Image (cartoon, grey):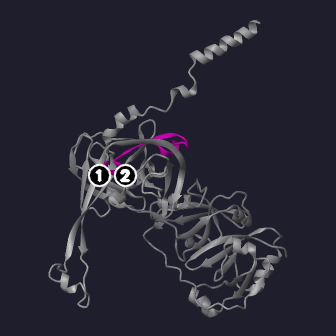
Amino acid sequence: MLKELLKRVVLIVIVFFIPPVWANGLPDFTELVARQSASVVNISTSQHLLQRLPEFGQTDPFFELFKHFTPQMPREQESHSLGSGFIMSSDGYIMTNAHVVDGAEKITVRLTDKREFSAKLIGVDKRTDVALLKINADHLPQVAIGDPAKLKVGEWVVAIGSPFGFDSSVTAGIVSAKGRSLPQENFVPFIQTDVAVNPGSSGGPLFNMDGQVVGINSQIYTRSGGSMGLSFAIPIDVAMQVVSQLRSSGMVTRGRIGVTIQEVTRELAESFGLLQADGALISSVEKDGPADKAGIEAADVILKFNGNTVKNSLDLPRMVAACKPGSRATVELWRKGAIKQLSVEIARLAEAGKPVPSVQGAMSDTGKSVERLGLALSELNQTQLTELQISNGLLVEEVTGDIARAAGLQRGDVLLAIANTPLHTLKQLNGILKKIPEGRNVALLVRRGNSVSYIAIRLDDK
């Protein structure tokens, strides 16, 4: 009886005296906004564009009507754009997006106290979409810089900016994902959030709950032109590395090693004997480039770069780009079932490799069927090899099997290698396939147009 009474007393205490988790409600952003909003600025730009009026030929029915009233001369039109930014130092350095100030002839920065300044563009880096501005002012409120690495998915974050020109607009949400890669964006591991970001918010800061900037709001995914709960921010550590170079030299230099890479899928990992689908798979190596000189080969899988683990292929370009041209880096890679250590000298990214020529030459319908691959293949003649600037390969005349078709192989592809063994003849290929067990994944190095990549395919019965 006494025991039951004690239980009821404890329950009453819990219900009436200990507030439940939900009683606190949503987090309070008021203090954060009050402290940080003064460091966020509105950025407006203008540029003059030449707009040529339409010209009418003498046979055009409108020629007589317009020849006296429409002089055929360019007409100047002023273009305006809006964006956001934030003060990163009290002496007037401001960070924003490169696309906010792209092509601008005049940049105006407006502070929250309504003061306006003409800004000087110190430098831009379009690869990361970061720009650095400078205004002539002192004792400005500056932001505190946070550590994006400490961000957790699900954590609350706050954006302040000028969407559609509405200054100092505050929106909040959570971190949806980290390390996102977007098309044509190889050097930025974006922070994805569901914070409402709209046109005009670009370049504004993303704050953590400690009031520290952890990112620059840069892009949104939208079908309507407005926010759809998918916004992407540049991690502030990436931006700070860029700004450091812009501030010192006005430009950014990056490293390169001269390789083409692709993701290691589970099927490709199996075919190369890897226990985990980690690393960056080398699909081609630029001839006489840094990697080639270091001994890196196609079919190698880079597992570590300068001691840092390459978890997926998109990690590698960022690691290489961060290296100073002329420096040396250590590479740990997987080759033919063993780990190998190499040293590579970093080159400058601006040094572009030679373009890969397109496939030339006509195909026939006389390909010999390779049943285990589900392909009809033919050997390339010397003329075709010369046109392609390759020394070996087998041409896909027809895709005959469902597995090959599902893997994405197409007529006109050229099989350059199986795993890391170059392919020269059909007899050689069949000899290799006979030694591979049924149901095993194999990696085919495939040339298609100007691209080279590995495709994993599961072998049919012998």
* Total count of labels: 2
Question: Any magenta on residue 411?
Answer: no
Q: What residue lies at 42% left-to-right and 70% top-to-bottom?
A: 350
Amino acid residing under circle 1:
Ile
In the image, residue 264 sits, relative to residue 287, either above or below, namely above
Residue 317 in picture, x, y percent from top left? 52, 62
Q: Quadrant of residue 142?
A: top left
Quadrant into which the C terminus falls: bottom right
- For mark 2, does the 10 Å Cα neighbourhood hold few (<14), some (14 to 19), or many (20 or more) residues? many
Circles 1 and 2: CB atoms closer than 8 Å: yes
Quadrant into which the N terminus falls: top right
> Circle 2 sits on which residue?
203
Does residue 202 appear anywhere in the picture?
yes
Amino acid residing under circle 2:
Gly
Q: Is residue 332 left or right of residue 70?
A: right
Residue 248 in picture, x, y percent from top left? 32, 56
Q: CA distance from mark 1 to mark 2?
A: 9 Å
- For mark 1, does the 10 Å Cα neighbourhood hold few (<14), some (14 to 19), or many (20 or more) residues? many
Q: What residue lies at 25% left-to-right and 73% top-to-bottom?
A: 51
In the image, residue 400 sits, relative to residue 17, either above or below, namely below
Q: What residue lies at 23% left-to-right and 90% top-to-bottom?
A: 58
Q: What residue lies at 60% left-to-right and 64% top-to-bottom?
A: 342
Q: Quadrant of residue 132?
A: bottom left
Q: Is residue 393 left or right of residue 168?
A: right
Q: Residue furthest left?
A: 68
Is residue 375 or residue 450 the one in the foreground? 375
Question: What range is drawn magenta here?
Answer: 147-165
The disc placed on residue 29 is: none
Look at the numbered disc 1 and give the secondary structure of its residue.
strand
Does residue 249 appear anywhere in the picture?
no
> Circle 1 sits on which residue?
43
